[in-house]
Image (tube, helix red, strand yellow):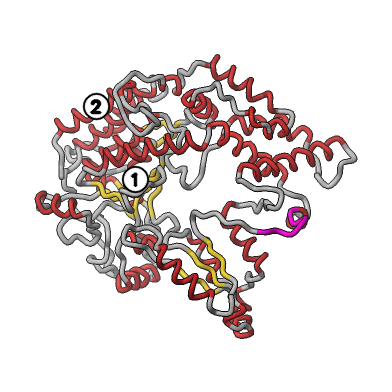
Amino acid sequence: MEHDHHHWRNDLISITQKLRGHGLTEVNGGNKYSSSSSSSSSSSSSSSSSSVDVEFNEYNLFRKSFDVLEKDDVILTNSSTEKRLRWVRSQIIGSDAQFDTPFGKRRLTYADNTASGRSLHYIENYITTNILPFYGNSHTSDSYVGHMTTKMVHEASSYVKKCLGGGENDAIIFCGSGSTAAIKRLQEVMGISIPSILRERMLKCLSDEERWVVLIGPYEHHSNILSWRHSLAQVVEIGLDSHGLIDMDDLRLKLEFFKTQNHRPILGSFSACSNDTIYIENIEEREDAGTPQIIQKIRAALAFWVKEYIGHKAIERQEQVYITRALERLLPNSQVFILGNTTAKRQAILSFFIYSSSSSSSSSVHDEEKNKGGLDLWKTSRDKPLHGAFVAKLMNDLFGIQARGGCACAGPYGHRLLDVDEPHSLAFKSVIEKGYNGIKPGWTRVSFPYYMSKEEFEFIIAAIEFIAIYGQRFLPLYHFCWKTGSWIFKKDCVTFGGSSIASVIEALTVKHDENHGSLLSKYLKYFESAKRIASLLPKFPPKRRIPDEIDIDLVPFRI
């Protein structure tokens, strides 16, 4: 539904009040919101450097050895959660970075932590000051550098193991590039990893009873699906229940079934689970043959230290505050559709659609469908959603917010979320094979890490609400590449009023000097600029041409 300008003006006033300190405050454990003054302003560039310096000096007490980190009293219990969060925010590398967009300079606001986190000055300074000067090969203790490096590596490994709940009978193996490398290493240990050219030949030599059964969940990353399917294992997928969660009844049935097949070896590889594994003695030395990942292990231990310093309960509480507030704000918005179960406890991650509108849209039918909770991907009663990457592009260009568009490397789960049946899936595949990767359906994703400031959180939510109102107006300013699915800004575009978009942007850039001013003033200027440009663009832009090889009814988004 298209909101009028007065509605947006009231929203902007509300945003201003919240960003000035009348917004998020924790109440009784952090699950409520109230109007009260906040000390969060100290998390911005105007932070008290003295408090940060004092706390940083406390951190330096641990610079000599990880032995201190093993002590239970190492966590500074006299520091409040907010003080600790301010410290983390002060340590983020690039927290004040700015970059050029088609609409002028924008402060970088990072909301893609699901994909990659942010580096901290504390960790990098620790590595530079205390590790690299004494770095050496860990296979010798004869030299000083060899002795110190070996000691630090063992202490870092022990600390990470302790943080993960490991004991004397557990082993920890550092695999390199994230979970993907860990899954691959596990397959090698199980003896089921094999070159693709030999797979069919080896399968003919194995009976069903000799093959591993690997159970995977319904919402796995590609790396936890494809690598198992390319191995010698039999892959069995557990379905979704009626609430969009893993079907525990289905899991029990499949476990019982395979247990009756001559006690076949079974492994569960799920997105979130914990299991106990017995390891043989000295496996860590065996699996760490050659020069180990010395710096990486120490950096990982320092990252775990930061997590322990904040506390997992405080992290969970803070993120639940953010995701609860985000759902409260966005679920009532008829132009926004949140993917997944919105009543179950969830991580501080939002995957969403923003629907477009047209002059012929029926608001009554629209609201009726919205209340049913249905996902209207192929326009049965309301206009199609905006392309996920387009929304991410607008968040980047208009506001400097780093989001992600697409299916987030979760294609099979995406099919379920978007109700893509087999005929549609085959139709998508056919178009993609013709070279039109842009046909792929997807969504936009943002995340709210525990250390995100309240101002940044409000800014991101307000940006989503702005795009829900005005987003489709910006479609004519971008070229859509059907081959890649990317959106490219048109520099020579003319606005609805006849002015070139370049001249409008130039005038706004001169008016708003992005190198000065508080964080709040920058955010408000971004909204003012975006609103000014939107007012010069058509409310219902004409739809662009679709390649002849693509069925217009197959396109799941507004072009």
Along the line of sight, which residue is nearer the eye, 128 or 438? 128
Instruction: Place residue 155 in its image quadrant.
Output: top right
Examine the rendered structure and indicate whether residue 65 appears above or below residue 209: above
Hey, what amino acid is under mark 2? Ser
Along the line of sight, which residue is nearer the eye, 174 or 485? 174
Q: Secondary structure at mark 2?
A: helix
Rendered image: mark on residue 391: none
Judging by the rendered image, the residue that carries numbered circle 1 is 489
Task: Using the rendered image of the protein, determine whether residue 479 is visible from the camera's viewpoint.
Answer: no
Examine the rendered structure and indicate whether residue 114 appears above or below residue 127: below
Residue drawn 45% across the image and 31% down it: 98
Alpha carbons under labels 2 and 1: distance apart:
31 Å
User: Could you tell whether 447 is left or right of 534 in the image?
Assistant: right
For the magenta stretch, what is the residue range? 278-284
**Which residue is farthest right?**
142
Q: Position of residue 553 (x, y in %)?
A: 22, 66
Q: Position of residue 124 (x, y in %)?
A: 63, 33
Along the line of sight, which residue is nearer the eye, 3 or 454? 454
Task: Using the rendered image of the protein, determine whether residue 227 is visible from the camera's viewpoint.
Answer: yes
Q: Position of residue 292 (x, y in %)?
A: 74, 49
Judging by the rendered image, the residue that carries numbered circle 2 is 14
Quadrant containing the C terminus in the rendered view:
bottom left
Sooner in the amino-acid sequence: mark 2 or mark 1: 2
